[in-house]
Image: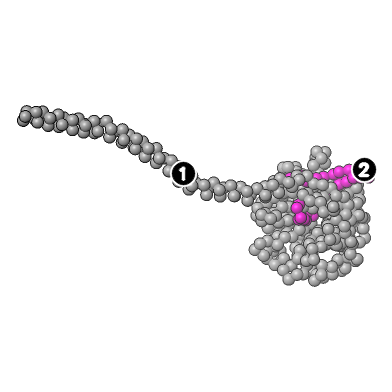
Amino acid sequence: MKTKVLIILMVLIALGVGGFFVYKNVIAPEAEVEVLPKEEAEVPLVVEEELEKEEAPEEKEEKVTEEEEQPEKEEEEKLPSVWTIEGVVIPGGYCDAEVVKLPDERYRMYYGLDPRTYPENINIVSAVSSDGLNWTPEPGTRLSEGFNYAMPSVIELLDGRWRMYYNSGGIQSAVSDDGLNFQTEGLRLATNLVGPTVIRLDDGTYRMYLQDCGEEVAFPTPPACQIKSAISSDGFNWDMEPGIRLDGTKPPFYGAFISTPSIVKLSDGSFRLYFLAGSEKLDKEGMEGIYSTDSINGLSFSNITFLFGKYIDEEGREIGTADPCAVKIEGGWRIYYASDCGPYSTGISSAVRGAINNE
C-alpha cells in the first residue's frame, strides 16, 4: 500500500514539474513577444504625430506669409512694363512741366513758355485738372516780376505754403500762399547748373538735383552732361554735395546730353530719378528719350532704364520727348513731358503705366 502511494506522489510531482517547465519556457515567451513588439511599434508613431503637430504651425506660418506677399507680387506682375502714350494734354509752345497734387485732390501743372515759341516772354504759367488729363489753363503768369523764368520745381511747405525753385541767372525761389501768386525770394544757389527738382527727405532736410552741362549748352549738338545735387536744412540755404549722381560721359550714355531731372520717392522709401538722355548715338539706336534710375539713399543711382522715346503721332509726325515729370496715380504712374515736332514744341503730353483714368 505504501508503495502505491509513493508511486502516485512521484507521478504527481513529475506532472507538476513538467507543467511548470512548459509554461515557463513555451507559453510565457510567446506572450512577451506579442507585447514588446507592440510597444516598440507604437512608440515611433506617437513621436511622429507629436513632431507633425509641433511643425505644423511653422508650416502654416510660412504659407500665410506667402499668401500675404502674394497680392503685392501679383500687383507688380499686373503693372505693365511699357508706357502708353496718351497724347497732348496741353497744346501749344510749352515745356518743363511740373505737377503737384492739391489738398482738394485736384492737380496743378506749372509749365514754361518755350523760348523757341515765346522768345520775348519766357515765364511760368499753370493749369488745373481733376483727372490729370483734362486741363484748364489759369490766367496770368505765376511770376510777374522780371523776365526769363524757366524750369520750375514746386513743393508744398509744412505750413501749407508753396515754394517754387526755377532758373533765372542761377537757382531762384519764390513763395506763395495759394500756389498762384508767387513772391520772389531771391537767389538760392549761385551756379550755372539748371533744371532744379526738389524733394523733402524724411529727416526734414531738402535735396535738389540739377543738370550740369558746362558753361553753355550748344544746340543742335549739346554737350555731355551730369546730374549733381545740393542739400539744405531749411529749403532756403543750399550747399552743393560732392560727387556726381549721374554721368552722361560714361556708360551707358558715352557722351549723352542728360537733362531735366525729376525726382520721386517710392512707397518702399527709395528714390527714382526720371530724366532725358539724348545723343547722336542714342538716336541712331532708337534709345533717345525718357529714362529712369533708382537709388536707396538718393546719392548712388543704378538700374538705368529706357522708358520711351520718339514716336509717330496720329498726324504722321515724328514726336520727340523731353522734360519728364512723374506723378503717382491710382494703380500706376503718369509722366508728363514736352513733345517736340522738329524745332517746335507741340505742347505738354502724357504717358501712363499701370492705369488709364480717362475711361
- Residue 35 is tagged as none
The quadrant of the image that shows the N terminus is top left
Q: Is residue 338 visible?
A: no
Q: At 92% across and 43% down in the image, what residue appears?
A: 316
From the top left corner, tell me how far across and down residue 269 is, in percent.
66, 56
Residue 354 horizontal/vertical position (percent): 77, 49
Does residue 314 show up magenta in the picture? yes
Tell me what residue is drawn at x 89 percent, y 64 percent: 138
Please identify, in this view, whether the residue under mark 2 or under mark 1 is nearer the observer: 1
In the displayed image of the protein, which residue is found farthest to the left?
2
In-image side of 352 versus 55 (left or right) = right
Pick the front one: 333 or 184: 333
Which residues are the magenta region?
305-332
Q: Position of residue 15 (x, y in %)?
A: 18, 30
Task: Count all numbered tags in the image, as a single digit.
Answer: 2
Helix, strand or loop for disc 1:
helix
**Circle on res. 49:** 1
At a point 69% along the width and 47% down the height, the residue shown is: 74
Q: Is residue 320 left or right of residue 237?
A: right
At label 1, which amino acid type do we have? Answer: Glu
Q: Main secondary structure of the magenta part?
A: strand
Residue at 88% across / 59% down in the picture? 135
Q: Quadrant of residue 28?
A: top left
Left or right placement of residue 4 versus residue 289 in this view = left
Q: Which residue is situated farthest in the front direction here?
A: 1
Query: Which of the two discs, 2 and 1, labels the residue nearer the N terminus?
Result: 1
Q: Secondary structure at mark 2?
A: loop
User: Which amino acid type corresponds to the residue marked 2 in the rendered image?
Assistant: Gly
Residue at the disc numbered 2:
316
